[in-house]
Image: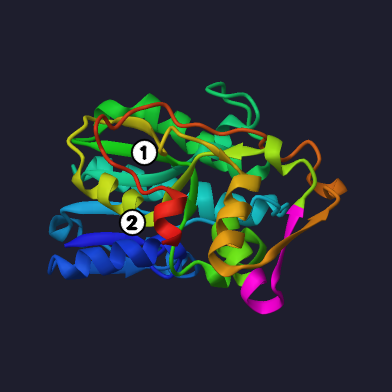
Amino acid sequence: MIILTGHQGFIGKKFLKELQSLDKEIMTIEMLDSWYFQHTFDDWDDIELIIHQGALSSTIETDVRKIYHRNIDFTLWLFESAAKHNIPVKYASSASVYGNCQKVINPLNFYALSKITMDYWVQDNISKFPLIQGFRYFNVYGDGEEFKGDQASPVSKFTKQIKETGKLKLFEGSDKFLRDFICVDDIVNVVLNNAKKSGIYDLGTSKPVSFEHVAECVVRKYNGEVEYIPFPDHLKGKYQDYTCATEEWGDYKFMTVEDYLK
């Protein structure tokens, strides 16, 4: 049996669908129910793998207690249980741990702090696991994220805006904001099918493009137009100017934004 957390989230749903297509027996845990699971579950001998995708993922959340409970406390208990019972783990970290310092740890918000906290714990305890892999997801997009609102990727957010109004809103200076956009289908494929040893890996295409480029792709597809808006004050100093994954995945052919929109 496979434990899958966060199965109701954007990325978790994709893992669930893929695992179901492989006829895997799955136990799903939503983070809001984690306390009950943590205090009642004891059938570890039946578990062959843990895929931990659940988290409070808002980068603007400031309730430290809430973040600690969902992203650190439960995760720590889950990982300690896995190590104790010799269960492999694959979990979602985040490229947000880099902030604006490419390849240097520099979290800009509480969400990123929670992710790097668990990454450091994994590094200190990695020898206790038969296998543990953390994946620092870069800027994930794809079908099924529309419900995320302002937390949705620009690909989905821009598409929604143009379909509703004929225009998409783009921050001024977006030609200078470059991100490593990765399709959620590639995330699931790489996580489930790689043969790497225990470690923490960047998971992105390693080919960043600008927000303006994404906007132009969406405009061309839906025949809309761009409305430039001022950069909001509350994001100043907390916004990543550039993200680019280390090349970890050899000849794997990642989906491009252009191909996805086609």
Q: Residue at x 36, y 46 (%)?
A: 91
Q: Amino acid at mark 1?
A: Gly
Q: The C terminus lies in which quarter of the figure?
A: bottom left
Instruction: Inspect this view and state whether residue 25 appears.
Output: no
Q: Residue at x 83, y 54 (%)?
A: 229
Q: Which residue is mark 1?
A: 134
Magenta residue span: 161-170
Residue designated by label 2: 185
* SS label for mark 1: strand
Q: Residues within 10 Å of mark 2 (few under 14, many from 20)?
A: some
Q: Residue at x 56, y 21 (%)?
A: 104
Residue 256 visible within the image: yes
Between marks 2 and 1, how big is the CA–CA gap?
Answer: 17 Å
Indicate whether 12 appears above or below 192.
Answer: below
Residue at the bottom extreme, as displayed: 164
Name the amino acid, label 2. Answer: Asp
Q: Residue 172: image x %, image y %?
A: 80, 46
